[in-house]
Image: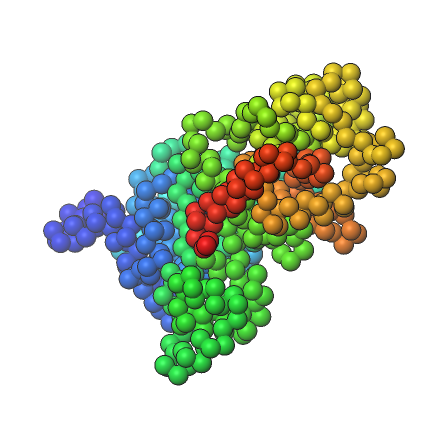
């Protein structure tokens, strides 16, 4: 290349330098085939693509939560082609996809990018197929793209990568390779961590994840929660209303007729700033492509929590749980530096206060590293004051923590799950004291499997649903909020976490609410408690865009 460069004009040299230094300049030369098989340049970029390119050029870890058809996969492919073509050392980009069709599309796209690469920067292709593109030769590699369908365990262990592009992660199989967890990981988690473990620690290596949402489950959901809080990650989200193509032109008559026949959801959207042209596009999309209103919200979200709404079988109101999550996020921001870390075993949000009454729910476990043992402390105004959770405490240690936290929070009434290891925990608590143990009228404990006279898991969950759906709680622990979002009623009638989701914290909260069920605040504090409750709800409404009068 040096000998050829000597014969280039100054203008040509400047152009090559610009391509080497600027991925935007590179991408402007690339073309793709559109839906009608016509060549189309990637530039000018759409408005919703600008923050994506900016993130790719700035951060090592990038996550995009996207509506459908915004071109993030294409731009990321072109960006990594730039890195591979202009790098002084051989790069290996692993591209993990959810289906073979995407694997082929990325391979064809890369070959088209290569054909539009300036000759002096075009590395020779030694091998090209659906699974891989090798630049140079096996003996003298100059870079590679490896394309893997994320469908089995152990994938990615045989390569050493410099970069990772994970596309449509929410649709990766979570259990097809193994329906049960191995070492606490689902299939999608294991295949992702396998590839991550191969990536060089060099400063120029990148991990890029982009996907639509698919409910509150799986690796993509968990990564989104991380990316929203971790400054090392760029979290990119654009609502569907920011996509200028997602609208239908209307005549004045059509606009007037549409406005007169809007349903309740559409009226709410209009009040929120969505235009009639956008509502018309949304209506056509729902009708012609057979979306439900919920699946449309998941694939064309307005807010970054809509893609993670559970399907219609969710036990709790997804809107109410989403509001709880937002309030928990806001509380964490407001109390930054004073709030306990989410990884802490014991999280005290509100220390005990004189004159307050507290309640406790305890979900027990064997302490073997799988299910968590959880203690939730609930204040008399419906605020979660503390959460203790660990999967490594045996029943004796659980009894000790129940006793210690009980003594700290004024000897609360405690509902302890008696199933399995629960009886051992209860016996330990009887010796140590610190709480008032809840019993049935006949002196029995609370068993969450099977029926207990005067109580049952279903009755407790029905009661909890009433409180949660009416927004009568403040749940400061984000993981508890996430678990509430994933509680479903399964075909056999069981109420538990969807799929392989943990539900221990949610169930401990359910038990705490059951303990609080018959509580009435002292007469002197009734008015103040009601004022506090109303003020809390109004504060949430004002903070999150609702209206209150």
Q: Is residue 424 at all visible to an observer of this figure?
A: yes
Q: Residue at x 38, y 71 (%)?
A: 38
Front residue of this view, candidates 376 and 293: 376
Q: Residue furthest top?
A: 432
Left or right for 319, reference 48: right
* Pick the front one: 37 or 521: 521
Can residue 34 be spotted in the picture? no
Check the image and report above or below for 394 versus 372: above
| Extreme residue in the bottom direction | 253
Which residue lies at the image location 67% right of the left edge and 48% below the top edge? Answer: 465
Q: Nearer the viewer, residue 152 or 448?
A: 448
Q: Position of residue 476 (x, y in %)?
A: 54, 36
Q: How far across and how far down the image is residue 454, in percent? A: 83, 40
Choose top left, top right, bottom left or bottom right for residue 250: bottom left
Q: How many marks?
A: 0
State left or right for residue 287 relative to residue 144. right
Q: Quadrant of residue 157?
A: top right
**Residue drawn at (74%, 51%) of the image:** 490
Residue 127 falls left or right of residue 504: left
**Residue 189: image location, x then y, percent:** 58, 41
Percent of width and height locating residue 283: 50, 72
Tell which of 70 and 471 is nearer to you: 471
Residue 274 drawn above or below residue 218: below
Residue at the front extreme, as displayed: 524
Specify whether 456 is left or right of 246. Answer: right
Which residue in the rendered view is the most extreme toward the right? 442
- Image height of 198 relative to 276, above or below: above
Please say which color scheme the image uses.
rainbow
Give the residue displayed 76% in from the left and 27% down from the top. 437
């Amino acid at each position: 290349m040096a000998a050829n460069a000597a014969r280039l004009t100054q203008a040509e040299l400047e152009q090559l330098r610009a391509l080497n230094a600027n991925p935007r300049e590179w991408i402007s030369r690339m073309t793709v085939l559109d839906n009608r098989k016509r060549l189309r340049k990637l530039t000018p970029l759409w408005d919703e693509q600008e923050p994506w390119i900016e993130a790719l050029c700035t951060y090592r870890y990038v996550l995009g939560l996207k509506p459908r058809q915004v071109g993030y996969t294409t731009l990321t492919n072109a960006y990594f082609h730039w890195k591979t073509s202009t790098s002084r050392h051989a790069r290996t980009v692993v591209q993990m996809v959810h289906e073979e069709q995407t694997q082929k599309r990325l391979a064809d796209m890369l070959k088209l990018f290569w054909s539009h690469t300036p000759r002096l920067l075009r590395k020779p292709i030694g091998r090209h197929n659906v699974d891989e593109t090798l630049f140079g030769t096996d003996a003298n590699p100059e870079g590679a793209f490896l394309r893997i369908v994320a469908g089995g365990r152990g994938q990615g262990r045989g390569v050493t990568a410099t970069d990772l592009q994970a596309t449509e992660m929410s649709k990766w199989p979570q259990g097809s390779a193994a329906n049960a967890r191995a070492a606490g990981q689902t299939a999608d988690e294991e295949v992702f961590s396998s590839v991550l473990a191969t990536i060089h620690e060099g400063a120029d290596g990148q991990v890029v994840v982009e996907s639509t949402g698919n409910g509150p489950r799986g690796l993509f959901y968990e990564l989104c929660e991380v990316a929203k809080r971790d400054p090392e990650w760029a979290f990119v989200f654009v609502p569907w209303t920011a996509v200028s193509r997602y609208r239908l032109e209307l005549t004045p008559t059509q606009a007037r007729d549409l406005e007169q026949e809007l349903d309740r959801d559409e009226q709410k959207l209009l009040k929120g700033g969505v235009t009639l042209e956008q509502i018309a596009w949304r209506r056509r999309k729902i009708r012609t492509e057979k979306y439900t209103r919920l699946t449309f919200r998941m694939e064309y979200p307005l807010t970054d929590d809509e893609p993670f709404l559970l399907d219609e079988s969710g036990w709790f109101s997804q809107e109410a749980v989403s509001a709880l999550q937002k309030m928990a996020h806001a509380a964490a921001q407001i109390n930054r530096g004073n709030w306990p870390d989410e990884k802490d075993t014991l999280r005290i949000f509100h220390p005990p206060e004189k004159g307050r009454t507290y309640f406790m729910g305890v979900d027990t476990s064997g302490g073997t590293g799988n299910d968590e043992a959880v203690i939730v402390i609930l204040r008399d105004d419906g605020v979660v004051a503390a959460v203790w959770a660990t999967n490594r405490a045996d029943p004796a240690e659980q009894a000790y923590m129940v006793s210690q936290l009980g003594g700290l929070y004024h000897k609360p009434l405690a509902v302890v799950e008696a199933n399995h290891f629960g009886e051992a925990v209860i016996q330990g608590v009887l010796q140590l004291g610190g709480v008032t143990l809840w019993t049935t009228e006949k002196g029995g404990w609370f068993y969450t499997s099977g029926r207990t006279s005067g109580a049952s898991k279903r009755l407790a969950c029905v009661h909890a649903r009433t409180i949660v759906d009416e927004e009568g709680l403040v749940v400061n622990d984000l993981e508890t909020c996430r678990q509430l979002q994933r509680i479903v009623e399964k075909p056999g009638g069981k109420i538990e976490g969807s799929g392989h989701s943990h539900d221990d914290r949610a169930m401990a909260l359910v038990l705490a609410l059951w303990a609080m069920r018959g509580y009435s605040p002292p007469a002197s504090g009734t008015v103040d408690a009601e004022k506090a409750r109303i003020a809390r709800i109004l504060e949430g409404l004002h903070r999150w865009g609702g209206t209150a009068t």
